[in-house]
Image (tube, rainbow, N blue to C red):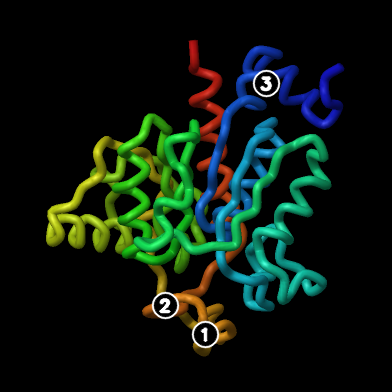
Amino acid sequence: MADTYTERSRLLVGDEVMERLARKKVIVFGIGGVGSWCAESLVRSGVKRLTIVDYDKVAQSNINRQAMATHSTVGEHKVYALRQRLLDIAPDAEITAVPKLFNETTKDDFALGEYDYIIDCIDSLKDKILLAVEATRYRAVFFSSMGSALKLDFTRIRIAEFWQVDGCPLASAMRKRMRQQKTFPAKKYLCVFSPEVLDNKGNTAVSDADEDPALPRKAQTNGTMVHITAIFGFALAGLVVQDVVRER
């Protein structure tokens, strides 16, 4: 018998698509303001085999924009807090929580060749480039989020191939670094981005890295709103769903 919670999804896309979604193996790197909503959207859409990767713990500064961040989860590893939330949505799903950073030291720990979809929601410029280079070497479809901070106008959120992303400082910095290092992705991939860039108006807040000195240091802490980060995450999940729907 079909899962009741996927009934409306099944009505729209049919049994075959829902069965394909359930079989796909997906990994999301970075489950902050974008990645947490991407993961939730994937599970609510019928993805049953999901790995979530993030070293960070829930901080009070996450509560404004991250799916699993509440006052009761502050101090917990993000991946474990989100895993609990996702299993409450889909008890039959296989949710693998990995409390780890993706970087040069750990890149071989993730067996990227086993996945159907690899989703990048990493903040670190260096590690984001590394994931793009590594992930595109495999058969998996790779999708990436560009910067979601300093934005308010959700109507400006767009999808484009990485080399065609315009107006995004993060994408520009990635391309500049790739050219300097002469290291490039092996194939093209789609990104969610917005060309909007606003200024911070409030006082500098405590960053996640300040709260946990073990985390990589951020060059700057920028303001972010949940209606932007969530749409970025939902768009990434939507790219996965659309790709599965188009399969023949």
Position in image of residue 1 (x %, y %)? 86, 17
* Side (left or right) of 219 relative to 100: left
Residue at 35% from the left image edge and 61% from the top image edge: 104
Estimate the spatial distance between the alpha carbons at disc 2 and disc 3, rounded to whole Å: 39 Å
| Above or below, comparing residue 93 to residue 40 in the picture | above
Nearer to us in this view, 94 or 62: 94
Which of pointers 2 and 3 lies earlier in the amino acid sequence? 3
Nearer to us in this view, 106 or 192: 106
Q: Which mark is drawn over residue 167?
A: none
Which of pointers 1 and 2 lies earlier in the amino acid sequence? 1
- The answer to whether one can see residue 33 in this image is no
Position in image of residue 73 (x %, y %)? 77, 69
Q: Amino acid at mark 3?
A: Met
Nearer to us in this view, 27 or 32: 27
Q: What residue sits right under mark 1 in the picture?
A: 213
Residue at 82% from the left image edge and 72% from the top image edge: 72
Q: Secondary structure at mark 3?
A: helix
Residue at 69% from the left image edge and 39% from the top image edge: 43
Q: Secondary structure at mark 1?
A: loop
Q: Amino acid at mark 1?
A: Pro
Q: Amino acid at mark 2?
A: Lys
Within-10-Å neighbours for mark 2: few <14, some 14–19, many 20+: some
Q: What residue sits right under mark 3 in the picture?
A: 18
| Above or below, comparing residue 11 to residue 210 in the picture | above
The quarter of the picture where residue 227 lies is bottom right
Estimate the spatial distance between the alpha carbons at disc 1 and disc 2, rounded to whole Å: 11 Å
Q: What residue sits right under mark 2 in the picture?
A: 218
Estimate the spatial distance between the alpha carbons at disc 3 and disc 1, rounded to whole Å: 42 Å
Which of pointers 3 and 1 lies earlier in the amino acid sequence? 3
Position in image of residue 122 (x %, y %)? 45, 59
> How many marks do you count on the picture?
3
Within-10-Å neighbours for mark 3: few <14, some 14–19, many 20+: many
